Image: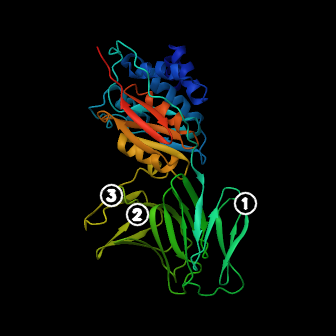
Amino acid sequence: MNKQEHQMTLGTNNRLAELFQKYVDKSITEEEYAELFVYIRNPETKEQVLAFMDEHNKKVQSDALVHEIDWDGMYQNITNPKKSDAGKRNSFWRYAAAAAVFVIGSFSVYYAYQPKEKKEPLAYRNDVLPGGDKATLTLADGSQIALSQNSTGQVATQGDIAIHRDAKGQIVYMVKGNEQDDSEQINILSTPAGGKFSVVLSDGSKVWLNASSSIRFPAAFSKQSRRVEVKGEAYFEIEKDAARPFYVNNGSSEIKVLGTHFNVMAYPDEYRSELTLLEGSVQFTKNGHSELLKPGKQILFTENDSETKQVNANIEEVMAWKNDLFVFNNTNIDEVMKELVRWYDVKVKFEGEKPDISFTGVIPRNANVSKVLKALELTGDVVFGIENKVITCERKKMTK
């Protein structure tokens, strides 16, 4: 379809264009979301929907806040959740993540089925703020330093290493004078639930920690190698140093790199762990078996199983947490709730039968938890409440 045909198609339904524009501008109301959802589910307006996506795609500039979202996958999830039609259209649409509060259930929501009697929704008695820069730094002597969002300047020293909090908010390990081997001075940086933090190691390598994560590292690396241990999730940008390879240990696995960008996700409450490579190359070793990983690839593994699986990575989804986003791609409700538990430091309970629901969409992580829950409720099949940092989830009963 050429540009003129796109414009003509889009012009046939001004209301649809208006709703989409409000969505991009973040001025859309919950009632208008529901109206837009109906348009998207209607096969007769498919071309208008895709035309808007094409038009918006051309206007989006490539920058740090722009991500790729599979709009076609969203459309198929809404209109035909039981069948895949990915082969028909393989393009991805550039999308401004700052405008995204669009969550779509990957199950059918039949608007012909409406409750005969309105049931009072679960109450939002309390709200919870999003997580932020919070961490604890444990020094080699066991002393602990609480790192708040506002602390800056020198934090501590470890041998010939000065530890500073810079203007960007990250902890920086700086060598004073000639570099010394302070590999015996082991430090630990750990984040709580609802916390994140970043550190620049003594070799210049950068590490970002997600919530409920930790990294164990020497104040200064030895002259032979650079070794750290990670729990939870961390993103690495490693400085190249051919004479000193960088190793990341996590239980029974080890990652060897010279200079590269990668993400490790290894939470103890997850059924599997993931290593995702964005740039460079790494060697992954587990139980004596080694394999190389190329950019755009991901290795899936478990702590107690010797087998691994290498797949194509969804970089958008993997890097969502570092880009302050929730990105759901047919993500089941258990996994969605795990992310909320880590980021908002809350608990979750289900009333009655747990909803068998998956979600696809993008939500900023800087929103209060009530905003996230209300966005999830727009699927029409689930309701939430929150009180005393406990999220209650209940399937909405639909009657004919």
Secondary structure type for disc 1: loop
Give the Cα distance between marks 2 and 1. Answer: 34 Å
Q: Position of residue 109 (x, y in %)?
A: 35, 23
Q: Foreground mark, 2 or 3?
A: 3
Secondary structure type for disc 3: loop
Q: Which residue is mark 2?
A: 294
Secondary structure type for disc 2: loop
- Is residue 303 depicted above or below 323 in this figure? below
Q: Which mark is residue 167?
A: 1
Give the Cα distance between marks 3 and 1. Answer: 36 Å
The single residue placed furthest to the front in the displayed view is 388
- Say whether disc 2 or disc 3 marks the residue closer to the N-terminus: 3
Q: Which mark is residue 272?
A: 3
Closer-to-camera residue (365/391): 391
Locate the C terminus by quadrant: top left
Give the Cα distance between marks 2 and 3. Answer: 20 Å
The single residue placed furthest to the right in the displayed view is 153
- Is residue 320 depicted above or below 275 in this figure? above
Can residue 225 be seen at all in this image of the molecule? Answer: yes
